[in-house]
Image: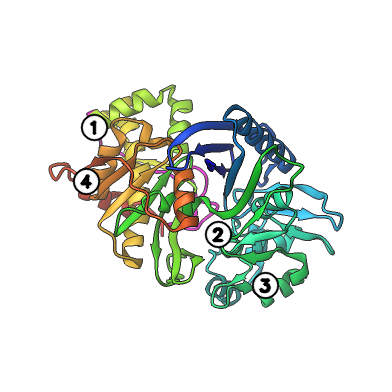
Amino acid sequence: MNKFIASIDVGTTNIKINLFNATYEVIDTVKAPHLTIYKTDSLFELDLEEIWVNIRAGLKDLISRNAISNLEIILTTAMHSVQLINQDDTLFGALVTWADTRGAEMIKQLSPEILLEQYYRTGTPIHSMNPYYKLLSMYQKDKRVGSLKDILFHRLTGEWVLDVSNASSSGLLNLAELTWDDRSLSEIGLGVNHLPRIEAVDYNRPALPSLFDAEVTVTIGTSDGISSNYVFSDLDELAVLSIGTSHAARVIHSEAQLNDQYQNFAYNIRENKYLLGLPSNNGADVLSWTNKVFNSSFEELDAIAAKRPHTESIFVPYLNGERAPTWDEAATGNLLALTRTSSRESVLFSIILGMLFNIKHNVSILEELADFNAIGLVGGITKLEAFPQLIADILGYKLYIPLIENAETMGSIAAVKEIELLREYRIVEPQSDKDYDAMFKKYMENVLI
């Protein structure tokens, strides 16, 4: 009997399902955007019912058109989501994502000492992305508290369970004990019975028989950040840089190293394995903003990245506030050192450099937390031809870019099964004659830390 794996990646904008055969080759794909997104200056909510309908429909399509009789589902979801649940299992309100900032006011009300204690107990940064601070402001008595992952697993299997990696990024897990943190729960007014049971990332259960016309097993899986790092499980001493609308620099380490100066996160994966890293609000969304304001295109920006025109201007890219490296939700962007000789092309290149210098800032912090000698690059930025070379030159690291589309879904398989899947990469070597150290130093002089 041929067994297939459907690796599901549920992000904040869409769903991707890659279907793998028994030799881990992608043979089919389903994608669906989130059509219901509610955003204001402080809110960012999704419709979990819509997500569930699309996941079930996508899986049924894959089973039908590939004549599948035996399927394993592996779930990967974005971190930091919150969903309140009524006692009868119905949803209360919308799914709150990491980008929702309604916890920011609670942070202002707490003392620095309490904030630091919370950070070191849980390994989750002091920021409104942290579900703990959201729940301080939005929790309602007697509601249960779930997230995207545990509710999907419950819908698929009937068990209300959360993997340890997503629990670790909730701001509610005691990082030393790997159990729900009593103090955090007490401050919110929660009991352990209001939260899902915590299990390992390889925990699996049979799917409810009524859902699919096949024998289906569901493995709870991990988070998107961890799956991105496991894309490169066949490579040693590697950090991973994800550049989508936002960006993050991450590394897997044997210890939960924390530094309150940088507020890096440390999330448990399994025994002696932690995801360390720094998340930023500003990635390729900076390029999208540039296209809107300057009537440019990604093709034009890629051509400018290849040409590299001379520029003296400095761009600070905090268009969406910022998490790492500054942790300032009120931070704004800034374009400096413009002169009458500045051209449209040079200004566009300065914006590109500002986005990449912000990434370099986070990578330089990660260097202090863990050793690595190369970087794996994932995300939409890899589809631009010239950008990877510019990134390699600015960061000073060899880049490995997976050739498989939606590689994170394969990373999820590697993370759950602890296997090294040999992959093909585009390798980009930094060119020593392209030295951006002086410009980066000038950039850092203009960044408020």
> N-terminal of the two: label 4 or label 1?
1
Under mark 4, the amino acid is: Tyr
> N-terminal of the two: label 2 or label 4?
2
Mark 2 lies on residue: 202
Q: Is residue 359 left or right of residue 10?
A: left
> Where are the magenta residues, as a range?
307-332
Mark 1 or 3, which is nearer the eye? 3
> Residue 69: x and y, percent?
62, 38
Q: Quadrant of the N terminus?
A: top right
- 302 above or below 396? above
Cα–Cα span, label 2 and label 4: 43 Å
Mark 4 lies on residue: 436
Mark 4 or 3, which is nearer the eye? 3
Q: Residue at x 56, y 54 (%)?
A: 221
> N-terminal of the two: label 4 or label 3?
3
SS under mark 4: loop
Under mark 2, the amino acid is: Asp
In the rendering, which numbered label is found on residue 184?
3
Cα–Cα span, label 4 and label 1: 11 Å
Mark 1 lies on residue: 308
SS under mark 3: helix
Q: Residue at x 56, y 70 (%)?
A: 122
> N-terminal of the two: label 1 or label 2?
2
Under mark 3, the amino acid is: Ser
Instruction: Classify mark 3: residues with Cα within 10 Å, few (<14), some (14-19) or many (20+).
Output: many
Q: Residue at x 28, y 32 (%)?
A: 386
In magenta stretch: residue 312: yes
Q: Is residue 292 left or right of residue 315?
A: right
Q: Quadrant of the C terminus?
A: bottom left
